[in-house]
Amino acid sequence: MSRPVEYAVAVDRFLSAASLGTNSRRIYRIALITWAWAMVDRTPPVGADRRNAVPPALPLALLDADHAALRLQKALAARSAAVGVRTANRELSILVGAVNWWRAQSWLTGDPTAGLRPLPTPKTRADGARISSRQARVILELPASLREQTFWHLLYESGAPIERALALDIDDLDLPGCRTLQRADTPVGWGEGTARLLPLLVLGRVDGPLFTTSRGRLSYRRAAEIFGTATRPIDPRGRGWALHQLSVAGRRYSTC
């Protein structure tokens, strides 16, 4: 395969070769386009401005330039400040995967990501406490919408990372098998509670995001706010629990 001149073409070829679901491919593309802004020393747009922004055109060879590593390092810090450490680290992981693939094709001679490391994730205010099995049962019995009930059960029974659970599409699901379809990532499996709720949540829908709002896919921030507010009355400290604590609490549970 001949070396592409344009970075955008290299992105397309990487995504075509990767075994990714529709939603994962979209997320990967957005992340890789975001890094294009950094390579021309420009700040990526965020929020509504990002939707209609035209990404800069640049040659793939810029990733082999002497200044590439420094620009990426500065961009990682800037992205962390703009969108949060978790999102910035996820975008870095996607770039590293693409660079490794491009190097395997002999399209790059160096590795501008070699010196980059994921930024430390800040601890949340509830990180010092653990959710017990009894507390988890109380949480899962809280009055909440079908969407929240399903999402909380899925996190508890699967132990899946919150970002991955929120990124699921309906066509990712193998409902009879109580798991996601085998694609690029290790399948996510769930237990009886999720198996009971999922068919109700997807009733009448055949594709699109699994967890939705009136504006589109449910965001991490909104999901965390809802969970924290709902669990505040039963948290002994009165703070509310964090979503990742529910995921960690249930990782020992097997699928149905």
Image: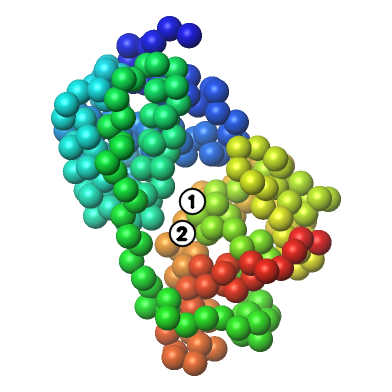
Task: Please determine whether, in this image, residue 28 is positioned above or below residue 56.
Answer: below
For disc 2, the neighbor class at 10 Å (few under 14, some 14 to 19, many from 20) is some
How far across and down, in percent of the image, does residue 83 sit? Answer: 31, 53
Q: List x then y, in percent, for residue 152.
A: 62, 68
Using the image, tell me which numbered label, if any, was put on residue 220.
Answer: 2
Picture residue at 47% right of the left edge, 39% below the top? 27
Instruction: Say which mark, if any, is on residue 215.
Output: 1
* Amino acid type for the residue under numbered disc 2: Tyr
Viewer-nearest residue: 9 or 102:
102
Figure check: 212 above or below 183? below
Can I make out residue 142 in this image? Answer: no
Asked whether residue 105 is in view, the answer is yes
Q: Secondary structure at mark 1?
A: loop
Q: Nearer the viewer, residue 209 or 99?
A: 99
Q: Residue furthest right?
A: 176
Which residue is at a point 53% across and 39% down the rendered structure image? 24
Q: Quadrant of residue 120?
A: bottom left
Q: Is residue 181 left or right of residue 44?
A: right
